[in-house]
Amino acid sequence: MEPRLHEPPQEHLVTPPAPRTRIPLQLEDWASVLIMAALALITFANVIVRYLTDTSFAWTEEISIFLLVVLTMNAGASAFVRHLHIRIEVVADTGAERRRRRLALFGIGVTLLFFVGMAVLSGRMALDELEWGDTSPSIGVPTWRYSMWLPILSTTLSLRLLGMWVRRWRGEP
């Protein structure tokens, strides 16, 4: 039986092995699982309450948005380290080894600079919210409690990227 033309080659379906890191990647994996479970429970509870009472919990949207931001940053760190992030493979994975290494160093470096900048700017935003006493619209919680996680997670992602850059600089795969 001939393979169809639109089927992807099988080697693209295999997940590459996780690189060795000082801090295990299972931390991000378990955090993602717990966040997804919390999101599912919150959403399910809201659906049940809305179905039974024709009202909804006001806080569920606010908490869900916060959890989605945390999940995105957390899973992004895991995806970068495992080389499962979005990239143009025709450019990144072809050509001589020296060229691929330079492109990888450049790409990781630019991404690192982006997340360092995001950590600094989001940290300033969280401090502004703390100083001004901003509160969330639905439940009145100080917004810095939500915003403070963005610089923390951007910093952890930056540290993961820095580790990737150092490993690539040393010539490790």
Image: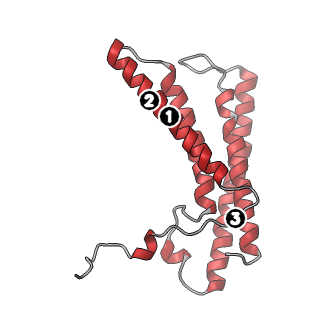
Q: Position of residue 145 (x, y in %)?
A: 68, 28
Marks 1 and 3, Cα distance to the nearest angstrom? Answer: 33 Å
Q: Residue at x 73, y 29 (%)?
A: 128
Residue drawn where x is 45% and y is 72% of the image: 12
The residue labelled by disc 1 is: 39
Task: Inspect the image, locate mark 3, and give the three-letter code of the amino acid beneath it.
Answer: Gly
Q: Residue furthest left?
A: 1
**x, y (%) of residue 18?**
62, 65
| Marks 2 and 3 close (CB-CB < 8 Å) | no
Given residues 52 and 130, the one toward you in this image is 52
Q: Earlier in the sequence, mark 1 or mark 3?
A: 1
Mark 2 or mark 3, which is nearer to you?
2
Q: Please, what is the three-letter code of the amino acid marked with disc 1?
A: Leu
Give the residue at x 71% y 57%: 160
Residue 136 in the image: state x and y as whole percent: 59, 21
Q: Secondary structure at mark 1?
A: helix
Badge 3 marks a residue whose secondary structure is helix
Residue neighbourhood size for the residue with mark 1, other residues' Cα within 10 Å, grouped as few (<14), some (14–19), many (≥20): many
Q: Which residue is mark 2?
A: 43
In the picture of the structure, the residue carrying the numbered disc 3 is: 109
Helix, strand or loop under label 2: helix
**Snapshot quadrant of residue 148:** top right
Q: Mark 1 or mark 3, which is nearer to you?
A: 1
Three-letter amino acid code at the position of disc 2: Thr
x and y percentages locating residue 173 in the rendered image: 67, 75
The reply to whether dot 1 and dot 2 touch (C-beta < 8 Å) is yes
| 5 versus 133 height, above or below | below
- Most extreme residue toward the bottom is 96
Mark 2 is surrounded, within 10 Å at the Cα level, by few (under 14), some (14 to 19) or many (20 or more) other residues, namely some
